[in-house]
Amino acid sequence: MKCLQLIQTPDDLKKINITLLPTLAEEIRNLIVETVSKTGGHLASSLGVVELTIALHYVFDTPKDSIIWDVGHQSYAHKILTGRKSQFHTLRQMDGLTGFIRRNDNEYDTFSTGHSSTSISAGLGMTCARHLMNRTSKVIAVIGDGSMTAGLAYEALNQAGDIHKDLIVILNDNDMSISKNVGAISSFLSRNLSHKFPQNIKHGIGEFLKSIPGVGAPFYSFAKRSEDMMKTFITPGMLFEAFNFDYFGPINGHHLKHLIRILKNIRDINEPVLLHVMTTKGKGYAPAEKNPVYYHGVGTFDIQNGESNKKQSAAPTYTQIFGKSLIELASDDDRIVAVTAAMPEGTGLSEFATQFPDRFFDVGIAEQHGVTFAAGMAAEGLRPVVAIYSTFLQRAYDQIIHDVCLDALPIIFAIDRGGIVGQDGPTHQGQFDLSYLRHLPNMVVMAPKDEAELRHMLFTAIQHNGPIAIRYPRGQGIGVPTDDPMEQIPMGTPQVLANGHDLLILAIGHTVNEAIAARKELLNHKIEAQIVNCRFVKPLNPEKLIPIVEKHTRIITVEENALQGGFGSAILELLSDHDAPPVKVRRIGLPDQFIPHGTQAQLRSKYGITSRHIVACSLQMIS
């Protein structure tokens, strides 16, 4: 890595001869592949923008000029070039480098990102602020084509074109988000004709015209103007010019000299500019180029063959169980349709899409639209199952309230990645869903203790005539059998798993299993705990729960959710509202802070969501 050894900051990058930059790109790619093979991470996205990253830091005066990386999962080369090369081996490791962008990490990280389609809005806000403060530095928003399926991006384009501030938007077009892009906008952006036609004129007809003695130069000039005019009509230029942006492209996003030249040209334009670059997701690593979906967010792997190093668990994941069970239910119920937001693989719906293509809907990165779209189908008598990660469902909060709960429409929210997710960090932890859903009128909220109970909850949800949410964690189940027929669970009814007279442990979701393990350890201390799997966060059935509570003077609640407004809070409210006898209550859950990155096991240990911590809390209460 001879070139990379010379670079600590973008100032060092500017000293390198432009002819050596392709070599630098290769070295950066090698470092990214080598590191991610050991740490896991967003490989394909970052490999696709190496040249673009180099060109941006080569041309612009960062950090005075600000680069905003939409989502941030394409930022590895940026991290390497901005003083974090020596730390790069700690990527996504606890207390190491975050896989996304956080403002407090580095002066070159100018806006925190993690969810898609925010870069243009943030960039426009920063541009307007700089104008008010008479600062002349530039703001560059780098947004992927997948992020252009979200309405937020167009709201920002609309305002930017209206107020004519000098924002630079770079559209990184690789025809991918996490999964293959969907929708009319994606099709429009990816027209092959738009890329080949201008290039053919430039390299073919252009050379011929210029060779004609006497009249060649004027003819070439006319043809070039015609090319630009035609390009406006047959490329996305037509769309972005309608937003009052000066549109340039599409250009090859891996051609460094061309990138640098055009970036220098647009740097001094004082109007909104959009540069359209075409890149290959996974560029430079053959397995990632061949399968960019798998290598979008990948675990550790063998560099030589690209195969995963992860040992296969005997137990299926909750996601797999959800997908399999939904197919089983849909085979007998034609009302069931599935909706996801650009994540058919991640939410376990790929096989459903294959078996029921007419009943599967991928709305793109458009959670708000997806929820209201599902509401429309529910209003016509269908049973939409909306499968979205907990952290991304936050984006559709108003739609859940206004378009679903207000009319009590029968929509099933399959909330994957509830609780601690792990190494993707604070923007991806599903730590708020129990809190932001349980106070909504007409909403039912459930969480299964294991994969078998997930099946029963899904069956229960399909039968329910109103909005209902099932929240389940990332990763493998505990290995219980899942072949039994699905059964309906009585609404709000808890399940007593073990009796005991010394204290009561009320748990929800996968923490039930931690409570069971804690009970076994407490028996060694001559303490018998009663364990209740509450199953429901809302409703809580007072006729079933209050008699259980009245037998105890000590209660522990356990959840993997923010303590504020979560399951434990619901129990406290229940006790207060029904004048329960005085009782000592301790709540175990996530503190009032954003949870950083680390493995699920590390973070559960750090924040006390384990059987060991339940035991310690129990001993403290009884002492």
Image: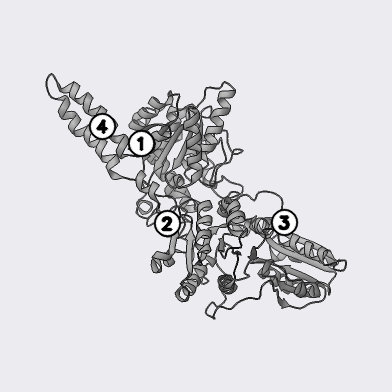
Q: Which residue reaches farthest bottom?
A: 484
Q: Amino acid at mark 4?
A: Glu
Alpha-carbon span between mark 1 and mark 4: 12 Å
Is residue 81 visible from the viewing direction of this image? Answer: no
Q: Amino acid at mark 1?
A: Gly
Report which quarter residue 221 is drawn in. top left
Residue 582 is left or right of residue 123, and the answer is right
Q: Look at the numbered discs 4 and 3 and tell me whether their residues touch, using CB distance below 8 Å.
A: no
Kind of residue at badge 3: Gly
Q: Residue 468 at what x, y percent from top left?
A: 60, 65
**Residue at 43% in and 29% down:** 58
Q: Residues within 10 Å of mark 1 (few under 14, many from 20)?
A: many
- Up-down relation of residue 419 to residue 83 (above or below): below
Q: Nearer the viewer, mark 2 or mark 1?
A: 1
Residue at 58% over, 59% down: 404
Q: Earlier in the sequence, mark 4 or mark 3?
A: 4
- Residue furthest right as drawn: 582
Give the residue number, with chain letter if any, for mark 4: 227
Residue 572 image label = none
Distance from label 4 to label 3 (Cα)?
A: 60 Å
For mark 2, what is the residue? 294
Real-space Cα separation, disc 3 to disc 1, in angstroms: 48 Å
> SS for tag 1?
helix
Q: N-terminal of the two: label 3 or label 2?
A: 2
The residue that mark 3 highlights is: 565
Mark seen at residue 237: 1
Q: Residue at left 54%, top 80%?
A: 485
